Structure formats: C-alpha cells, structure tokens
Image (cartoon, coloured by chain):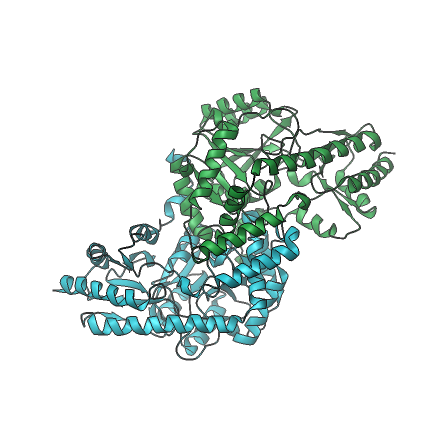
Chain colours: A cyan, B green
C-alpha cells in the first residue's frame, strides 16, 4: 500500500510535539511542552453571548456558504487595527481570512513553492512552518538566530549563493526561542531581501503579546510589497475557533484565494461572525492587556525559578513577550535524554531537535510558560532542576 | 512577480462558478447557478441553543486547541450512522473530521498525488474535485457518465492502458449531472478498481438526500480497503459550519492526520461541538426527512416546468436526489452563449464547460433546484425557456 502514497508524505516530519502531547495528557505530568494559551484568559461568557446574538440576528446567513475571502467587516477590522496599532497602512482587500495561521502557511506553500525551491528559515525554526512547507518539497537553508534576531551575515551568504524564494521568520518572541529582532535587524533584513527579490513570510502570531519593552515596527512596514504578514486570533481570542489571516498585496491575495477555494472553500463562517461580534461588543485592547499581564507574570516567575534552581551552566533566553523561553544545556548533553528522565519525574518540555531543518543543536529545549500557573511552574521547575542536576553530575 | 508563483497555480482552474455567483448576487436575477442548500431548512434556533449549551458547559475546553483527528464522540456518531443507515461497518478511528469535504479532497491530493499521477474522474465531473486535485498536478482521464453511472467499458480501457492511482466519483445524485450509479455498476466498479489496485474516492456529499427510489449500497461496502469515502454536514446541517469527514482505513487516516496537522492543525472546534450537540438534542432523521421533502418537491416542480416550457429538443436528467439536474441542448448550441442571453433576462445557470477536464460538451448546462422556492422556479424556468426558444429558432 505504501507505494500509493505521494513522496511528499515521507518528507513531512511527523510532529514529535504531537507525540509528546500524548505522553503529557496524564494529569500528573506538569507540561511545559505544549504551545497552548492559558484557558483562564478565554472570554467564554462573551463568546457565548456573541454566538447567541449573531445566530439570533442573522442565523440563516451564517449557516450558509460564504465568500472565500472572509467576512468583510472582519477583514476591515484587521486592516484598521494594523493602521492604528502598528502603523501599517493596508486595505481590507489585502487581508485573507484563513483557518488559523497554520492554513496561511499551507496556502503560501501552495502558491509559491515548486519542488526544489529554496526556502530560508530561522535556526531553530517554527515547527509548524517546517511541516507546512515540507509538503511542497523545498530545499531548506537554516539561518542562525542571534540574540537580536537573524544572523545577517549568514543570511547574506545564503542569499548570494543561491536564489532564495522565501524567507520565513518570526520577528516577535519567536517560537521556539523567544528571540525578538531588533529594529536595526528588521531594516537590514528588509533591505537584503528586497535586493535579491526574496519574499518574506513575517509570522506575527505573538506580536500583540509583548509584556516588556517597546513595540517595534513590522518588517512589512519597511517593505510592503515584499512581505506576506501572518496574523492570528488564536493567541488573543481563542485557538479553538480556527481563525487567522494573511496580509499581502492584492495580486497575491487573488492567487491565495484561488488555492484557498480549492482547499476548503472558506473558513468557518460561524466563528468569523462570532469573533467579529465579540470584538465589536467588548474592549479587545483591555482583553489583550489582561493576557499580557497574566503571561508576563508567569514568564517572570518561571525565569525567577530557573535562576534560583537550574544548574549555572544552563543558559536561557528572557523573552519580552510570547509564550516560550529557550534553554541551552552544556555542549554534549542531549535534551532528548533529559526529556526521558524528566518524564519519569512527571515534568515535560520539548527537546530542540524538531525545530531544526538541518544540523541540530541537540542540547536545546523549549519551555512554555503561558499554559501553567505559578504553582505548577514552581513545582515543574523544581522537578526539572532535580533531573538536570542529576544529568549534569 | 509572476515568476515567483509555483507552476501549480497556473494549472488550477479559476472557478468560473465563483465568477458567475458574483453576477447573480443581483436580487433581480433568479439563479439556478449556485450549489447552495435552501436556508429555509437550516436549524437556526437549534444551533443557537446548542452553541449556548456547549459554551456554558465546556467553554474553556472548546476555545482551546484540540486534536487533529476531530472530536471523538462526533467521529463515533458518524461511524455508528454508517452502520445503522448504510450497512457499512467502520470504527470511529476510521473517521477523520475535516473542514468540509472540500478539505477532504485537498488532504487526499496531498497524501496520494505525485505530479503526473493518473487520476480518473467522471465526465462531466465535480468542479471542486478538479480544482483540489489540480494543485497536485496529476494527469486526468475523464470517463463518460451514462444514465446508470460510470461507463465501465471506457473505464476498463483506461485502467488497462495505464496505472490509474485514483478514481474519483459521486455515485449518488452526482454533481453536476444528477446521475445515480445502479447497484450493478457499483459492484462492477469495485471489482475493476480492486483488480488494478486503483483507489476510489467515493464522494457521498448528497447521499442522504434521496427523495425517490431506494437507497443503494455504498461502493465502499463492496471494497472496504480500496475506497476512501467522503461525507459532509454541509447538506444535512449547515455548510457555514465547515465540517465534513473522510472515512478510510486506519493506516490511511494516519497519513491524512499528518498532512492535516500541517494544513490547519484541526477543524474549528466550536463547530464540531455545536454540531454534535445539535445531533444529540434533536431528531436528525426527522430533519433530513424534512430536507428531502422540500428538495423533492422543488425538483418535481422544476421538472414539471421544464417539461411544460422547454423546447422539446432539450434533454434533461430527472435525479432521484441531490440538488442538481443536467440539461443537454441540441448539438452545436453552446450553453455559454445561452448563458449570456439568459443573464440579460435575469436568470442564471452554470454552462457545462468547467465540469470537464478534457474535451468539453459545450451544449450542457447545470440547473440547481435546492436553493429556489416554487415561485422562483416557475418564473426562472419561464425566463429561461424564452431564451432557449429564441436561441433554438
């Protein structure tokens, strides 16, 4: 039977994280492995009221097929918010509503990637993007991340060596590393990509979750034509309602619409209407501020506990936003082996391996702080420290 | 910029139907062009009650990420229903919930189709399948549809000539033709495909919408291993909640899950829970019976009006279910030209052209009867008859 499967299937990494999540469903396990929002910040009552209201007022339309592009008022809200919050001037016609930003990656792969095309991606890079793009069988170049963002020297080297079609990056609070690109890096990056005619996929899934420092301009604001910007309601409203968007030039949106129609006709219309209603009837800024407060406190607390308990040789990032921090063990220590010990102590994280497209840094690990309260962070870091001390002996 | 697009994009037919639907949004136009359910049968109040209830009882879980496979009780409902209603014995693990059955087609294309693979499809064939598969750049063979289903002689010829990987068909009330495969055809088809190791995609989107005659066994019931069966809630509950499913062997579901994860992580969870709750608290069989009654009456009425008013030379199918009938003009008359005249008279249909992957039968046209009440059917067929009489003069 295997001979019937397409070869792309064998190139797609099975999600190690998904496998880990199965292990960690045990309630006894304190998991820093997932990438889940904290359900305590979900606006359940408000979403319920919004669902009742839109179905009451417009049920017959909401249960019918709708347009592929997405609900126009929602597209307008997104474009208006870019203007007011991020200083980016885009029109509703430059927004395509997608089934989560994961679908944005799939649609972009479909529209742009021929087999063998060159895609540059951060090292470590976002696993979901690696999976989505892998289906279109590109060649990946991985560009190291430094403390202030992408390693421009390494990127320039690759850009000069070959025709790179897409560069994929997460400039704000990157997944998995927590790194944020400096403003200077954003400018240099936009110049370099423009010079070689390389498109950037700027994944801004976490952009609104800054709890320290100042907002930095989107890379797209330096190169509007050359950047496809991905956004998501998953981190600011709810991920169960699968809604994200792609912001790109109109002639690109047109192509994306054609392939989206072939992929799922349109995104769930009830969720589009519910989210829009929720935004109209509630103070979304106050809601996002609350998420920032909660995650900021959890991040501070996790950093504190790590500082107090982890062996000194272990380095870690101190992200200014987002949901993850990234720890690096001394050279030669494999995070995968630490994971196996950790799970025996009922604590979990993600070893760095799946985040690499090329050479792996096996001593790295990702820790999620958004999904655990202080009690679980305290106990989890205590358990993990015990394991690390044992391994590093 | 065009040089950056993947070549698959240029192979994907832009949906002519989508373009037509724009023309027909004018309220003055009576449209038999779309493929929309009749909103009068949407269970709006029940869906509203279900949404309130599930969000009340389990909101924090519903707004969170969930598993790629879909909500287990919903998968179980689907597999139980196959057993009780269709005599097909499958387990919940053989069901993958998808974002409409259109996504099912996309996922199947991803898992099975290498560039250049051979796909056999009905002639005329379902446009959504042609679009979805085109993204994976197969070679299409088109097999004529006869009154009792696929032309077995033509299919055998193609199966013997080349290695056909997939055969895509809609055995019940086919879109666009309204044709239903006889039981004998289903058996012969399943034997022929099994002999050549060709997988079948059995699209049963309309299977529950039979208003005349007896239910016939699914092709999958004659060849469980070799058939991937597609189903949908779009026609029996609501298409705005994008929910369908693929029923296939477990080892195929596993591969589909991997690519679905890369495509959108999971389908909208609120809609999954709402539809399940709706089914549990309501009599879905009574609801489907009501849809059948409404569509059956509309179909009868459209056939009556056509019989009364269309020029005699025009042939048309009399479907036993579904949403469409198919008319054939005398040789040499182009439906596209009729369409242009029709739209001036404020009546629309879909000319047959987009339903062909190879040679077109330009004298064909698809008429939808599900989305128009008797008043509009009467007036629409009257207008169309006037145009046809003029063209056939």
Whether residue B164 is visible to the viewer of this picture, yes or no, is no
In the foreground, B141 or A230 = A230
In the foreground, A296 or B317 = A296
Q: Quadrant of residue B364?
A: top right
Q: Is residue A75 left or right of residue A230?
A: right
Q: Tell me where residue A195 appears, x and y as whole percent.
A: 48, 70
Q: Is residue B379 left or right of residue A362?
A: right
In this rendering, the answer to whether B104 lies above or below A196 is above
Q: Tell me where residue B137 appears, x and y as whole percent.
A: 52, 43
Q: Is residue A165 left or right of residue B358?
A: left
Q: Which quarter of the image is occupied by the C terminus of chain B?
A: top right
In this rendering, the answer to whether B85 lies above or below A382 is above
Q: Please name the residue shown 37% across and 36% down the image.
A: A2
In the foreground, A147 or B142 = A147
In this rendering, the answer to whether A18 lies above or below B290 is below
Query: How many tags in the picture?
Result: 0
View extreme (left): residue:
A393
Q: Which quarter of the image is occupied by the N terminus of chain B?
A: bottom right
Q: Tell me where residue A83 appears, x and y as whole percent.
A: 57, 74
Q: Quadrant of residue B340?
A: top right
Q: Tell me where residue B384 appears, x and y as whole percent.
A: 81, 39
Whether residue A214 is visible to the viewer of this picture, yes or no, is yes
């Amino acid at each position: 039977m295997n001979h019937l499967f397409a070869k792309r299937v064998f190139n797609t990494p099975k999600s190690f994280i998904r496998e880990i999540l199965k292990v960690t469903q045990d309630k006894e396990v304190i998991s820093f492995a997932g990438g889940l929002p904290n359900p305590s910040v979900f606006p359940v009552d408000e979403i319920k009221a919004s669902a009742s209201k839109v179905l009451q007022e417009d049920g017959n339309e909401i249960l019918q097929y709708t347009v592929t592009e997405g609900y126009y008022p929602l597209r307008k809200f997104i474009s208006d918010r870019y203007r007011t919050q991020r200083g980016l001037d885009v029109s509703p016609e430059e927004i395509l509503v997608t089934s989560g930003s994961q679908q944005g990656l799939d649609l972009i792969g479909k529209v742009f990637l021929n087999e063998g095309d060159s895609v540059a991606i951060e090292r470590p890079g976002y696993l979901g993007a690696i999976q989505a793009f892998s289906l279109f069988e590109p060649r990946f170049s991985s560009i190291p991340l430094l403390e202030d963002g992408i390693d421009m020297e390494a990127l320039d080297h690759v850009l000069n060596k070959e025709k790179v079609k897409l560069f994929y990056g997460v400039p704000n609070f990157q997944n998995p590393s927590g790194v944020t690109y400096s403003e200077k890096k954003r400018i240099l990056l936009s110049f370099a990509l423009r010079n070689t005619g390389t498109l950037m996929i700027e994944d801004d899934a976490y952009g609104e979750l800054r709890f320290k420092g100042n907002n930095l301009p989107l890379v797209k604001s330096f190169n509007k034509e050359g950047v496809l910007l991905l956004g998501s309601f998953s981190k600011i409203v709810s991920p169960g309602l699968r809604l994200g968007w792609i912001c790109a030039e109109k002639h690109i949106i047109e192509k994306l619409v054609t392939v989206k129609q072939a992929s799922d006709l349109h995104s769930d219309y009830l969720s589009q209407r519910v989210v829009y209603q929720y935004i109209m009837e509630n103070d979304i800024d106050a809601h996002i501020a609350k998420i920032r407060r909660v995650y900021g406190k959890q991040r501070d607390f996790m950093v504190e506990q790590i500082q107090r308990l982890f062996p000194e040789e272990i380095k870690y990032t101190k992200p200014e936003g987002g949901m993850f921090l990234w720890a690096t063990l001394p050279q030669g220590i494999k995070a995968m082996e630490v994971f196996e010990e950790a799970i025996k102590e009922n604590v979990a994280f993600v070893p760095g391996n799946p985040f690499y497209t090329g050479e792996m840094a096996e001593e790295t690990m990702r820790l999620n702080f958004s999904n655990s309260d202080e009690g679980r962070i305290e106990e989890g870091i205590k358990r993990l420290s015990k394991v690390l001390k044992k391994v590093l002996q």
